[in-house]
């Protein structure tokens, strides 16, 4: 019997697989602002290279599409060429035999709908409207924090300066060092080499080692007064920057303490109060005044604030609980996840000892409620979600962390009703198993499986299916709203309300911390200009020169967590900080795209707003 051997074809295929892996990393690190027509052309040629050439629509049609796109890119295209591109792509979608052909043509059609202005610009101007940005980490941070700058400062041991640089754009360095969803890492160019930098982890090291860092001095007093409604991340961000600009700011907060959902919606094992208080105290040190336990509409009206202040910023957040509308939702033992998380900051926390708990939802709030229930002593914790685990909006590390702590994730289970005992307490949750189906709106839609309903006995049901804006009192005054969200222009101004601005979750709906910071930063700039000023904010720091060295592939340093069997029993911070050795290695991985990339060619980083 002859021995099996590795054939030359298999070796060649391994090389091709490596090329695909390299391509995947390059695509995932694609910078913002690339010409979409050129990218479409490149992807189309890749699909053409994958084609078997059997069917005419794929073999000839894709080649024809590629030629037409090249004509556009060369500045020789016409309106007739655009019409031919659309007609050809529709024909391929309808007639190609396999996915290589019809999905490639569909990509062209989708791209034309999304980037029609760019296609027309190539015809009329011979160029693209895309604005190339070569520092993805800065561009993709909603607050545009200078990530390469503070990474280089941390690498040199200048931790306090790193905090100062972060604060130029984001007054919550401590908070974001722990709970930011780090969109800056999603297109990190280091991915082309190996994997993205752990930017949030580097920030955490700076926060833990910088000590107390004073805020910069305020600009000269302007004599203007601004009222901020809401002491969450968006309102406090606006208050911080407006105060630095020299305006007098007063924050009106309904709760006893500032922080909004940072304090009342994120559990202490992810965000200890001392980290949050550190940032808030720094914000207040700029001269911001505060009035807590103040309910707008009862203690003071919006119209009164308009009369007493030169401008008003509404940042009331989205803390109102949403329900599913299923039978039994009003039973004793049914709580909102937000209500549970709020209660955990009290001296006497809820006691779930010996109880079976079911959480409904698949987002980060659902994971927070799931892991919190385990820490409150629950006998069993299950999280049910009507889609797959891969469809959950929660961060994957949160899902994996919950499972490591002994919580069970039950995907493809749609809640039907909550059954109760004779005394009105929760007896259990009935779910209908689902089958994942057709993609609708970018997500696979589940549908009922042809199997019977299932029953999960439990004592507590936690609803984590979304939050809404409690804007009724403002809508009664005439503030424009849509589905409870406040309507604003791009600069945050409220149409028809002179001097009134709004932003954050109450405009966008429930979002992330860094998006709330962005909204507050935009509002501060808009209000400053509305008041007749154009105040620049800069860090006045010298960034270390970019080193010249080879960038060998090096593994990413991931943050570790305390052992699951220990952390699940308390509310102490679960995440460990990098060591100094790990920090130094991770900082050295930065490619300094701000210097070696297009930003350096154009004059370097933005040192001001």
Image: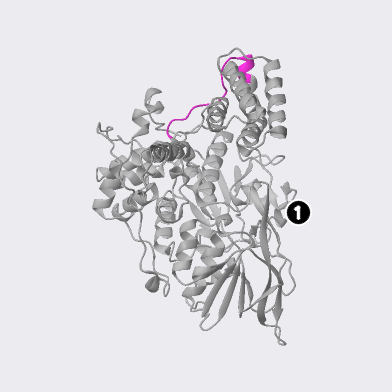
Left or right of 153: which side holds 605? right
Q: Is residue 65 something that shows in the picture?
A: yes
Q: Magenta residues, as a range?
A: 121-135
Which image quadrant for residue 466? bottom right
Residue 97 is covered by the magenta coloring: no
User: Helix, strand or loop at disc 1?
Assistant: helix
The dominant secondary structure in magenta is loop
Of 359 and 342, the residue lying toward us: 359
Q: Please give the residue where the numbered disc 1 appears in the rendered image.
A: 476
Residue at the bottom extreme of this rendering: 422
The quadrant in which residue 255 appears is: bottom right
Residue 93 percent across, percent down from the top left: 69, 33
Left or right placement of residue 557 versus residue 35 in this view: left
Q: Residues within 10 Å of mark 1 (few under 14, many from 20)?
A: few
Residue at 55% x, 14% y is 74
Residue that appears at 49% across and 38% down: 222
For the point 62% across and 48% down, which residue is it?
A: 508
Going by the image, does 332 lie left or right of 18? right
Q: Is residue 60 above or below residue 286?
A: above
As drawn, the residue found furthest toward the front would be 1
Residue 162 picture location, percent across and down? 33, 44
Q: Is residue 538 above or below residue 238?
A: above
Q: Magenta includes 130? A: yes
Q: Nearer the viewer, residue 262 or 312?
A: 262
Image coordinates of residue 527 in percent, x first then y, are 57, 39
Q: What x and y, as percent, mark residue 402?
A: 48, 66
477 up-or-down from 126: above or below: below
**Residue 330 in view:** no
């Amino acid at each position: 019997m002859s021995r099996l051997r590795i054939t030359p074809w298999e070796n060649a295929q391994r090389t091709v697989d490596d090329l695909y892996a390299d391509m995947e990393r390059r695509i995932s690190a694609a910078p913002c602002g690339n010409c979409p027509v050129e990218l479409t052309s490149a992807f189309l040629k890749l699909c053409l290279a994958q084609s078997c050439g059997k069917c005419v629509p794929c073999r000839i049609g894709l080649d024809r599409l590629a030629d037409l796109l090249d004509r556009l890119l060369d500045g020789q295209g016409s309106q007739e060429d655009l019409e031919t591109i659309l007609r050809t792509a529709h024909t391929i979608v309808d007639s190609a035999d396999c996915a290589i052909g019809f999905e490639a043509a569909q990509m062209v059609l989708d791209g034309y709908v999304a980037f029609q202005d760019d296609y027309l610009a190539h015809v009329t101007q011979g160029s693209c409207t895309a604005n190339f940005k070569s520092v993805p980490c800065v561009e993709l941070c909603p607050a545009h924090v200078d990530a390469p700058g503070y990474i280089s400062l941390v690498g040199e041991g200048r931790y306090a300066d790193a905090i100062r640089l972060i604060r130029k754009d984001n007054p919550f360095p401590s908070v974001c060092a722990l709970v930011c969803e780090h969109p800056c890492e999603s297109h990190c160019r280091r991915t082309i080499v190996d994997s993205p930098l752990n930017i949030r982890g580097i920030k955490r090291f700076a926060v833990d080692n910088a000590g107390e860092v004073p805020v910069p001095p305020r600009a000269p007093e302007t004599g203007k007064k601004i009222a901020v409604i809401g002491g969450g991340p968006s309102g406090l961000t606006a208050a911080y920057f407006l105060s630095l600009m020299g305006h007098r700011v007063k924050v009106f907060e309904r709760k006893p303490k500032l922080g909004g959902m940072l304090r009342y919606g994120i559990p202490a094992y992810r965000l200890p109060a001392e980290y949050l208080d550190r940032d808030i105290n720094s914000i207040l040190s700029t001269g911001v005044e505060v009035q807590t336990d103040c309910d707008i509409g009862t203690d003071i009206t919006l119209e009164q604030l308009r009369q007493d202040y030169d401008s008003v910023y509404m940042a009331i957040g989205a803390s109102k609980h949403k329900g599913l509308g299923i039978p039994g939702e009003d039973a004793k033992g049914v709580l909102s996840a937000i209500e549970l998380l709020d209660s955990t900051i009290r001296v006497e926390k809820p006691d779930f000892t010996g109880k079976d708990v079911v959480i409904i939802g698949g987002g980060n709030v659902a994971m927070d409620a799931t892991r919190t229930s385990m820490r409150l002593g629950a006998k069993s914790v299950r999280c049910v979600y009507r889609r797959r685990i891969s469809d959950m909006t929660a961060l994957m590390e949160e899902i994996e962390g919950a499972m490591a702590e002994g919580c069970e994730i039950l995907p493809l289970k749609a809640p039907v009703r909550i059954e109760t005992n004779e005394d009105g307490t929760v007896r259990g949750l009935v779910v209908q198993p689902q089958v994942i189906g057709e993609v609708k709106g970018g997500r696979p839609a589940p549908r009922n499986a042809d199997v019977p309903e299932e029953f999960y006995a439990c004592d507590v049901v936690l609803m984590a299916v979304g939050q809404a804006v409690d804007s009724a009192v403002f809508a009664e005054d005439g503030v424009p709203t849509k589905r409870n969200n406040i309507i604003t222009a791009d600069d945050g101004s409220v149409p028809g309300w002179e001097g009134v601005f709004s932003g954050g979750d109450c405009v966008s709906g429930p979002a992330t911390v860094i998006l709330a910071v962005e909204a507050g930063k935009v509002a501060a700039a808009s209000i400053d200009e509305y008041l007749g000023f154009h105040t620049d904010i800069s860090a006045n720091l010298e960034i270390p020169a970019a080193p010249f060295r080879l960038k060998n592939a090096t593994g990413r340093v991931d943050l570790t967590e305390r052992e699951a069997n220990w952390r699940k029993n308390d509310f102490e911070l679960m995440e460990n900080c990098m060591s100094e050795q790990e920090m130094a290695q991770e900082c050295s991985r930065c490619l300094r795209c701000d210097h070696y990339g297009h930003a350096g060619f154009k004059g370097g980083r933005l040192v001001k707003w």
